[in-house]
Image (cartoon, rainbow, N blue to C red):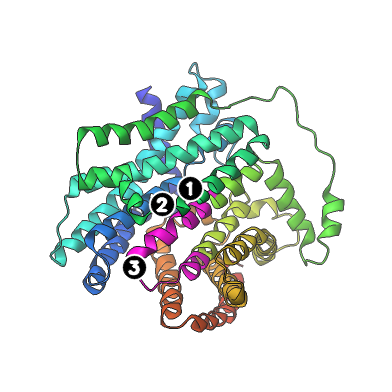
Amino acid sequence: MFELFRSMMKEEWRMHSAFFGDRGFALFPAVIAAASMLLSLSMIIFWRIISQTDVLLGIHYLLLFMGSMVGGFGLLGREVMNRRFGQASLLAYSSRTLPISERTIFANFIVKDVIYYFFLYVLPFTVGFVAGAIIIDMHYSFFLLLLTLFFSFCIGLSFVFLLSTIYANLGKKALFLLLLIPVLFLIFFQGLEFDVFYRLPSFVLYTEPSLKVLITCIVLVLVPSIISLIFLKVDYPQSQKHYRNRFSEISDKLDFYGYSHFMTKDYLDFSRSEGGAGKIVFSFLVPVLLVWLFLPQLLKAVPGLDTLVVFTVVVGMMASSMYNWLVEFDMFSSYSFLPLTVADVLRSKLNSYSLLNVFPFLVVVAATIYAGRLIDIVHIILLFVAVSMYVVSVTVYLTGLNTTFSLYNAGTFASYVLAIGPVVMGMIFLAQLHFHLVLLSVLLIPVSLFVLKRSFVKWD
């Protein structure tokens, strides 16, 4: 078993280093460390309005949120072990021929991924945060903080892993159940005090270390993961799947777009791939609902920030993840025999992206209505559109059609953070000065169009 795990670790390294070189991939954690150090150093400015305890609470929930974004392993079971990813055929794909059970292979795959996330995100984040704290004369227990942040990440991951496994087994029947859960949470959280958030087990383990809390954290990670592995759905189709030819029908409906045929292809690829609508649920809607549930309470630690503005900015940034879905397994070589340029393919993906933005748009509108701020709907929609356009334009400029892998390059990721971070933080703090200043976000739209124009030239 260890030989399989070791081979998977090597495979992951070679897959990424083949894109960026060993140095480019190895320096990625250094960028994460630098970003978390800046976060820690910023405390010298904000320590009067936010305590060290609240900062620790915030970063534990941040890691919980990150874990939830990568926890959709239940949808990946068939994808990883039943098909090839682009030009790469993963070791897990050989599960058909290896004399090892699918669960064993997939368990190794998950442990490998968790370890990579630990070294790529959790460890460098902790190192940078603690180093920055030492510089401004604040002190944290490094190893205890590393352990509790890792638990936060794994709790978020295991929870969404379980939900995605339920969906993989029950299919569309489970969508109602999965969408009902956040509604119940929303009702439940209405009557809770802010102090409840201080009871996150991983955070409690840092503030009040005890064997009982340690066991609780381990149970919250292992039990959902073990249940998910037991009910892992990996089926090998014995016959070909057949679909009705809907290409002309759909492209006619999308004829008002300049690239309707390409958008139809994107839709058919997306709907027929493993997971289908589950990808929207687990990589976008579940994290967004978690943000909506936790953000109003967590922002009580930072008085003055407009919760709806922060939520809209976060949703605008997260919406760009849908561009990743569109280009994840699509390579330009698939189009190279057609009279097309890379810019044509990018434009078609952006058209598909604009159509998919209906989902986050509706989320933002629903949040505005729920917050009783219908009078501010124009400001909020403009902010969402501007942030979404800007973030995706930067993504296209830096990564082109290779978003999934390219952001693991240290230089590319650093450029991504520096291009987006100051802008979105600026929007949030402008709203803090005066709400109507969010209208300045309209300036991001011509900037985004200029960046996209430069992107087309660059990638051609």
User: Which class describes the residues within 10 Å of circle 2: few (<14), some (14-19), or many (20+)?
Assistant: few
State which region is magenta. 286-313
**Label 2 residue SS:** loop
Secondary structure mostly seen in the magenta stretch: helix
Kindly report the distance in space between the C-alpha atoms of the residues bearing marks 3 and 1. 23 Å
Kindly report the distance in space between the C-alpha atoms of the residues bearing marks 2 and 1. 7 Å
The picture quadrant where one finds residue 38 is: bottom left
Q: Are marks 2 and 1 in contact (CB under 8 Å)?
A: yes
Q: Which mark is residue 302?
A: 3
Residue most extreme to the top: 99
The spot of residue 36 in percent (x, y) is 30, 61
Q: Residue at x 37, y 56 (%)?
A: 24
Q: Nearer the viewer, residue 459 or 358?
A: 358
Q: Nearer the viewer, residue 433 or 11?
A: 433
Residue tagged by mark 2?
Answer: 192
The spot of residue 452 in percent (x, y) is 59, 73
Residue 149 position (above or below residue 38): above
Q: Residue at x 53, y 79 (%)?
A: 441
Q: Earlier in the sequence, mark 3 or mark 1?
A: 1
Can residue 355 be seen here? The reply is: yes
